């Protein structure tokens, strides 16, 4: 079955292109019934309030929640991460509807506004262990959220010292904002919980396909909660 990409708004074309580079077909999902034809789902970055409004308009929330609860692999990038979180806080949080399921609190626009977007080399040991390649990943953060706390079942895949971000350091005004980025603070930017994957940054905007490859290896969970065994053999 193909990989679904929620195509309401945001960088869904870029995800489909990244999947194509790995030889995998990504299909656009806009209607609840289309979720029945995909084995996993990517929720792209974009603007989470707009995305939530469109999802509501298309009556997608019940089907999306069911998809998550069935243990099918779902990856949220940036706005997609916000969508998957159990709780969202921070600037411009208008109480938008969330899919939920990912046991964490996410802070929207944690690093500031659009012009405080940045790129950084992110150490990704767990991804390297599975996918190989360089020890770090060039991560693109665009008006990105950060994860402030996680539940016991959530595995942290990447975090960053806020003080390491040049953009923040050169914009002291950000540090003065209440409840925003603090110098020296460490925040989480990539997590995994069962078959949910979430990244605050945008792997689909880089040529490095290791996050997509990692996600494609996540298999649907069986009824007893364990990961289904998928044969890697193409001959049987
Ligand atoms: N700031 C956006 C939001 O809160 C997310 C940005 C992104 O997806 N690049 O929805």
Image (cartoon, helix red, strand yellow):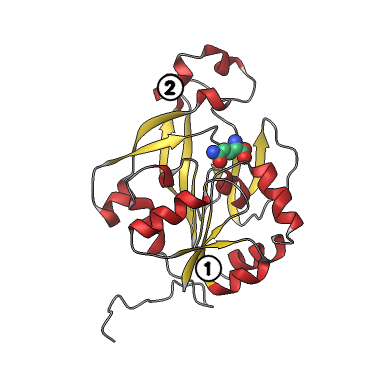
Mark 1 / mark 2, whichever is N-terminal: 1
Residue 206 or 66: which is nearer the viewer? 206
Q: Residue at x 58, y 44 (%)?
A: 79
- Mark in front: 1 vs 2: 1
Residue at 46% over, 13% down: 170
Front residue (pair 41, 24): 24
Query: Which quarter of the image is occupied by the C terminus?
Result: bottom left
Residue 55 x %, y %: 70, 55
Say if residue 213 shows up in the picture.
Answer: no
**Residue found farthest to the left:** 133
Q: Is mark 2 within 8 Å of ligand 1?
A: no
In this rendering, the answer to whether 111 lies above or below 5 is above
Q: Residue 124's spot in the image, x, y percent?
A: 33, 44
Query: Residue placed at 65% from the left, 21% from the top?
Result: 178
Residue at 24% from the left image edge and 43% from the top image edge: 134
Q: Secondary structure at mark 1?
A: loop
Residue where numbered disc 1 is placed: 72
Dot 2 falls on a residue whose secondary structure is: helix
Q: Is residue 58 above or below residue 166?
A: below
Q: CA distance from mark 1 to mark 2?
A: 36 Å
Mark 2 and mark 1 in contact (Cβ < 8 Å)?
no
State the residue position of label 2.
163
> Residue 166: horizontal and vertical position, in percent?
41, 20
Task: Return the residue nearer the eye: 183 or 47.
Answer: 47
């Amino acid at each position: 079955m193909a990989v679904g990409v929620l195509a309401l708004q945001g960088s869904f074309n870029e995800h489909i292109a990244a999947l194509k580079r790995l030889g995998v077909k990504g299909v656009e999902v806009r209607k609840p019934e289309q979720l029945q034809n995909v084995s996993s789902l990517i929720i792209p970055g974009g603007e989470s309030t707009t995305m939530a409004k469109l999802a509501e308009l298309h009556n997608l929330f019940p089907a999306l929640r069911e998809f998550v609860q069935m243990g099918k692999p779902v990856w949220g990038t940036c706005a997609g991460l916000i969508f998957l979180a159990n709780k969202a806080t921070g600037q411009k949080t208008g109480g938008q509807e969330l899919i939920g399921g990912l046991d964490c609190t996410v802070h929207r626009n944690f690093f500031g506004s659009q012009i405080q977007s940045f790129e950084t080399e992110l150490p990704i040991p767990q991804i390297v262990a599975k996918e190989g390649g360089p020890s770090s990943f060039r991560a693109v953060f665009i008006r990105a959220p950060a994860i402030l706390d996680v539940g016991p079942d959530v595995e942290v895949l990447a975090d960053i010292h806020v003080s390491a971000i040049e953009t923040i350091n050169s914009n002291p005004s950000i540090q003065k904002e209440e409840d925003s980025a603090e110098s020296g603070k460490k925040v989480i930017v990539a997590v995994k919980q069962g078959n949910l994957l979430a990244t605050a940054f945008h792997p689909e905007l880089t040529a490095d396909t290791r996050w997509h490859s990692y996600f494609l290896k996540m298999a649907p969970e069986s009824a007893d909660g364990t990961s289904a065994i998928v044969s890697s053999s193409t001959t049987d």
